[in-house]
Amino acid sequence: MRPIWSGAITFGLVTIMIKVVPATESHDISFRQIHTADGGRIRYRKVCELDGQVLRQDEIARGWETATGTLIPVTDEDLDNLPLPTAKAIDIVGFVPAASIDPIQIGASYYLAATETVAAKPYELLRQALERSSKVGVAKFAMRDRERLGLLRVKDDVIMLHALRWPDEIRSTDQVPVPDVAVTDEEIDAAVRLAETLTGGDIGELRDEYRDALEEVIAAKAAGTTLAPPAEAPPASAEVVDLMAMLERSVQDAKATRSGEPATVHPMPAEKNKVAKKAAAAKKPTAKKATAPRGPRRSA
């Protein structure tokens, strides 16, 4: 794997020379933009607005625009010589329990490898210290034109670095509406039973089915054929749903799937449907009686 950054981990007075390589890769299918009239590929060119020339990548540098519109060039050398302790170092500032890190903060992931023989022992020392303490290291480092917050942990004897979002980059949940409905203890217990039934699956066996289906469509079009459209899902019912019945059926389906039997999609039981319809009808005001205006009705 090709390193994207090199520097050092600073752990107190200990320095560990390392290189950083991406820990993940994308398997997304990339599309090209094409002209609908003739199928020609659409290309984007980088053009200088002063002289109109199309530029190569090696002719392009970065610049910072001032409030007056002046562009100040910023070179790689400028960034390498930043007056910042973390410019070429991953500086560990503390250790915290892994559970104290909110997953919403976690961004890109990287593997850290020792780059020199002299770095092997301090690398191993830090790795075992992380494992034995059952904690993760919190660090600051500079990469890709900004200082970042990071998390250090161990995976399969390798020290990993996870980029973290700064606390002020996390939006508050105050603007998210929370449903104001009541659920019973029996419904909660049934939902917990369903969660327990679904516990223990191997996440490593999961596949990107959207990507598989997209590959099938592309292969069929390349061969000049078309795939049969998928069966339409049944429309959602607007009737009152017996939540307990749905939870119990879900538990049965989950158990069947775990035992190797195919799961089935169940419609609302006929008897339950009748009861639900009668209950809904009983709650509607009749034309013979004058009733006070009702507020909005809650449903579990």
Image: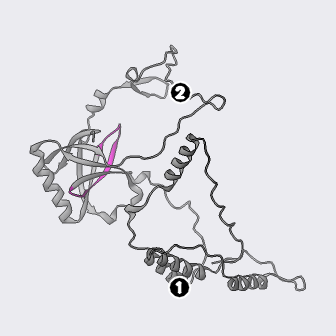
Mark 2 surroundings within 10 Å by alpha-carbon count, few (fewer than 14), some (14 through 19), many (20 or more): few
Q: Residue tagged by mark 2?
A: 43
| Residue 47 lies within the magenta run | no
Residue 88 image label = none
Compared to residue 144, the image places residue 186 above or below, namely below
Q: Is residue 43 above or below residue 247?
A: above
Residue drawn at x 59%, y 64% is 177
Q: Residue, x 77% and y 83% (percent of image)?
A: 283
Is 166 displayed left or right of 152 in the figure?
right
Between residues 155 and 64, which one lies in front from this camera angle?
155
Marks 2/1: CA–CA distance: 59 Å
Q: Position of residue 34 (x, y in %)?
A: 59, 32
> What scheme was used to colour the molecule?
one colour
2 vs 1, front mark: 2
User: Farthest residue toward the right?
Assistant: 288
Bounds of the magenta span? Answer: 141-157
Q: What residue sits 20% from the left and 65% below the top?
A: 133
Displayed quadrant of residue 236: bottom right
Give the x, y percent position of residue 261.
49, 75
Front in this rendered view, residue 127 or 144: 127
In the structure shown, which secondary structural element does the residue marked by tag 2 occupy? loop
Question: What amino acid is labelled 1 in the image?
Answer: Asp
Residue situated in front as seen by the camera: 291 or 188: 188
Q: Amino acid at mark 2?
A: Arg
Q: Earlier in the sequence, mark 2 or mark 1?
A: 2
Q: Is residue 232 above or below residue 38?
A: below
The residue that disc 1 covers is: 185
Q: Secondary structure at mark 1?
A: helix
